[in-house]
Image: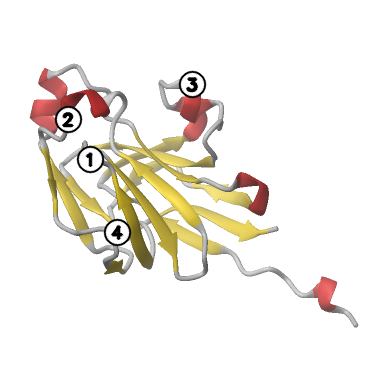
Amino acid sequence: MFEFIKKQKEMAVYAPMDGVAIKLSDVPDDAFAEKILGDGGAIIPENGNVYSPVDGEIIDITDSKHAFCITTNEGTEMLLHIGIDTVNLKGEGFDVKILSGDKVKAGTKIAEIDLDFLKKNNIKLHTPVILTEPENYKITQVHEGIVTGGRDILFLYKKL
């Protein structure tokens, strides 16, 4: 009878890389900053190790190796997108460690990227992590500041 009183559990999305966590609105790309693709947070990485931000399954890896679609164990779909305009590199500078269909835990190393190569190619390193079905979820808190990939929370969200 009082189901509506029960608090909805917050779910955590962890930083996918070591670096500085920023608000999505600070990403220098309108599709992310204006939350056209969904809501979430982002990292400006300080090294090239990339970790799964959640427990779940890798459902897709782009041919250019710069983006990962992940479904959490709770059914949330998200996108991890490394850098801005990285699709133009056609996979160069990316070493993916997993395959589509692989089950991962938050903190599992899923890729390594060559940050120096990306910088030499004038790639902005901002790395968004977004919930791709924003109508089903609400971001409740976004962390800003220094984070350790796979260990520190990037943002919390609830199902609607």
Q: Which residue is mark 1?
A: 63
Give the colour scheme shown: secondary structure
* Marked residue nearer the N-terminal end (2 or 3): 3
**Is label 2 or label 4 in front?**
2
- The reply to whether discs 2 and 1 touch (Cβ–Cβ < 8 Å) is yes
Give above or below for 22 relative to 102. Answer: above
Q: Secondary structure at mark 4?
A: loop
Return the residue at label 3: 30
Per the image, label 1 sits on a secondary structure element best described as: loop
Question: In the image, what residue occupies the spot 59% across and 64% down?
Answer: 10
Image coords of residue 32 (percent x, y): 47, 30
- Mark 3 residue element: helix
Q: Which residue is mark 2?
A: 90
- The residue type indicated by label 4 comes to Gly
The mark that comes first in sequence, 3 or 4, is 3
What residue type is disc 2 on? Lys
Q: Earlier in the sequence, mark 3 or mark 1?
A: 3
Quote the CA–CA distance across marks 2 and 3. 22 Å
Mark before the other along the chain sequence, 2 or 4: 2
Mark 4 Cα within 10 Å, few/some/many (few <14, many 20+)?
A: many
Q: Residue furthest bottom?
A: 1
Mark in the foreground, 3 or 1:
1
What residue type is disc 1 on? Answer: Asp
* Mark 4 or mark 1, earlier in chain: 1
Q: Which residue is mark 4?
A: 150
Q: CA distance from mark 2 to mark 4?
A: 26 Å
Quick one: label 2 or label 1, which is nearer the N terminus?
1
Q: Nearer the viewer, residue 152 or 120?
A: 120
Q: Which kind of residue does numbered mark 3 sit on?
A: Asp
Of the 4 image quadrants, the one containing the N terminus is bottom right
Residue placed at 17% from the left, 30% from the top? Answer: 90
The CA span between labels 2 and 1 is 7 Å
